[in-house]
Amino acid sequence: MSATLHYFGIRHHGPGCARSLRKALDALRPDCVLIEGPAGAEALAVEHLRDAGLQPPVALLSYGADDPQLAVFHPYAEFSPEWQAMRWAAERGAALRFIDVPAGASLAWQRARHERLGGGEPAPTAGEGEAAPQELADDAAAAQPTTDEREAIEATEPAAAERREPHQDPLDWLAHAAGYADGESWWNHMVEERGDGEGLFEAIAAAMGELRENAELRNGLDPHEEALREAHMRSGIREAAKQGFERIAVVCGAWHVPALTGKATAAADKALLKDLPKLKSAATWVPWTYRHLSSASGYGAGIDSPGWYEHLWRNGGGDARTVGWFARVARVLREHALDCSSAHLIEAARLADTLAALRERPAPSLDELNEATLSILCNGDATPMRLIEQALMIGERIGSVPESVPTVPLQRDLEAQRKRLRLKPEALSKPLELDLRNDTDLQRSELLHRLLLLDIGWGRLGGAGRSRGSFREVWELAWQPAFEIELIVASRYGQSVEQAATARSIEHARQAERLPDLSRLIDRVLLANLPGAVEAVAAELQARAAVDADPLSLLAALPALANVQRYGNVRNTDAAQVRHLFDGMLARACIGLTLALGGLDEEAAGDARETLLGADRAVELRDDETQVATWRGALRQLALSASATPLLRGLATRLLFDTGAFDGEAVARELSLNLSQGAEPLQAAQWLDGFLNRNAAVLLHDDAVWALIDGWISNLGHEHFLRVVPLLRRSFAEFEAADRRDLGARVKRPLGAAPALAAQSSWDAARAARALPLLRELFGLSAVGDAHER
């Protein structure tokens, strides 16, 4: 008996297609299901489909066995037709086969594109079997060159730019004929928000046949790769038919149906596939997220609203779609303390139904629901709609995979640590506050820092995390599926996170070109508590510092080392070796500092200023009298030097003045010398810029400094004044707005006069006395001395 073939052209990640496909499969009851997926990976799929731990969204990850950076994902959501077809086959005991080209071929194409463009690391792509939302035909959307790749190709092949025609969605033709703006909205309304059973697929096949035959559209894909994919799928169908199956269901992207049902011969397909490239590959299941399933993530086959599609899948028709959606909207708004009453919800549902009726739709679509939400629930304010978009339209769901899924040892070690430390991977960014005095929080911090050393940015340390004390860290956690690839890549460094981070840090140290990079690295490995890496990086830093004769390079390395002193105690790290490095580098930098800062241009002087300010803060953190004295001695030489750049001499004078190393008389002497009438105006302005150091306090509170600067500006000639004004304006622009207002008020009053507000005291002794009893109670003071206080 010959096999009967039934073709189901679907849109990837389409809930309407998935619902219709389930109905069609239940009616047909095929004994073999062929799915457009990477051939050879079906064994992995079948092995884990029945495992309750495999919860979508998930993705089949295929990567190069010899080069894990070559990787391709095939994502599936609960509402993906391929996922439902796989589940149906597993539940009914039907044979399951993948018929697209093997993952090794996709990886070979990816490597070829990478080599053609030259350089850089190949980025993992979504599977070639996934269709883009704007182009149902693009079943290999991720395989097409990116914008940068196309520009690079056109730069080397000018004719390519002339040959390339503007991309056009084939469905736009059908959509325009039906009165829709684009193919996306037409397809959603006609297919995904309905789902009418097997008859739907006959209509889809007819429509795709007409488009492929008559539209002559360009979808931007590589024609040769597409021809190979379709030839491989036809060969897979023939092979299944030969094996004696009676009813075969073929589930593929709708655009491919006409090519698979055409008249291509087996001999022609065999000849075409003869030179199909392949790389050795491995595969596994990895968690996926709705955020990475969305088109906003850059995923070529992405959909606009995964969360809405999940809602459609679970609440296909009737009132459940509208009522259930508004119930979820209400929950989101109320969780953020926004008003949303039952009356609001009733009116919003009525408005959505009315809009659907006016547009001749059987039920409200997402457009009608959003318009009703904006008008009734959000009072026309688009801000709450962004909450709804992130929480519901896109969604926060992240999938899971069972422990039995094959992984590298590094992945298993990370999973074990995540469970032990109760760190759950989540798709959306979540804050995590850590108190490093707590052992569990300390270990969490160390794990996140180790992952950062492996270039796995699961956690991002917030800027406020360290400013409020050395015992507190604030992280933002957001897990991304691509981190699974990074873990596989990093597994070559070790079988545990600690081993891999140590080996990667040592490699970073050997590759570092500048001392500041090494000093920042030693700070990072100390935060990650990697003793082996600390020793290796410190030795490398010491060896480099011994031969580096640039004082600015040595100074730039100090801030990161000073952090070790600040955070070493709370993390129980031995920072003695780092302190020794700090002291030696500071001493060597101070010896030649003045000579190194002479004759710098404006840009170099600006960079040197930032280096000096960072070094000054680092010495303060080091908090050692000997090192402070050494640093201030170097600043004194710089301030008094005639050869150093004026900007930096002024900065050194200000730093010494702020710490009390220069008294008022010494500062007045330097001001008089550098702002005298004999000083070149531009150099004087640069010195003043360095002395002010973006801080107006010295001008506001020191009459002597004010008088000297005022006298200098007053005595400038017209021509000199015009040359100096732009630099002065730039210097004063660095002040806070309140400081600039206070400076303007001070200009209006005579030198030495008290501010007007201070002269007019509004002190009310009787009113102030009323607060004394409460203050005594707060401070624990007795009533004795009350008369004295008054």
Image (spheres, rainbow, N blue to C red):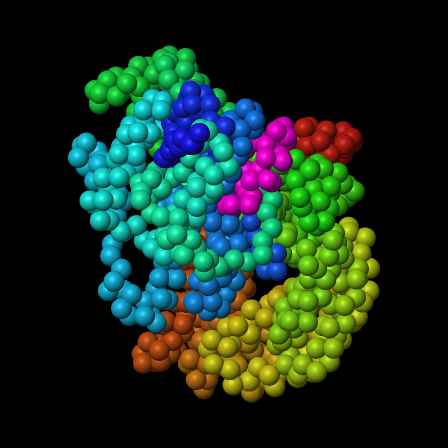
Which quadrant would the C terminus be assigned to in this image?
A: top right
State the image coordinates of residue 556 (x, y, percent, origin top left).
63, 71
State the image coordinates of residue 36 (x, y, percent, origin top left).
45, 41
Q: Residue at x 51, y 82 (%)?
A: 600
> Residue placed farthest to the front in the image?
1
Indicate left or right for 114 with 531 as reference.
left
Along the viewing direction, whichever of 307 and 610 lies nearer the viewer: 307
Up/down of 695 relative to 585, above or below: above
Q: Is residue 34 magenta?
A: no
Which quadrant would the N terminus be assigned to in this image?
A: top left
Up/down of 717 relative to 697, above or below: below
Q: Residue at x 60, y 44 (%)?
A: 284
Q: Residue at x 50, y 73 (%)?
A: 606
Along the viewing direction, whichever of 470 and 639 lies nearer the viewer: 470
State the image coordinates of residue 425 (x, y, percent, origin top left).
62, 39
Q: How many numbered marks are there? A: 0
> Which of the 4 quarters of the picture holds residue 745?
bottom left
Magenta-colored span = 35-60
Q: Is residue 340 visible?
A: no
Q: Is residue 586 visible?
A: yes
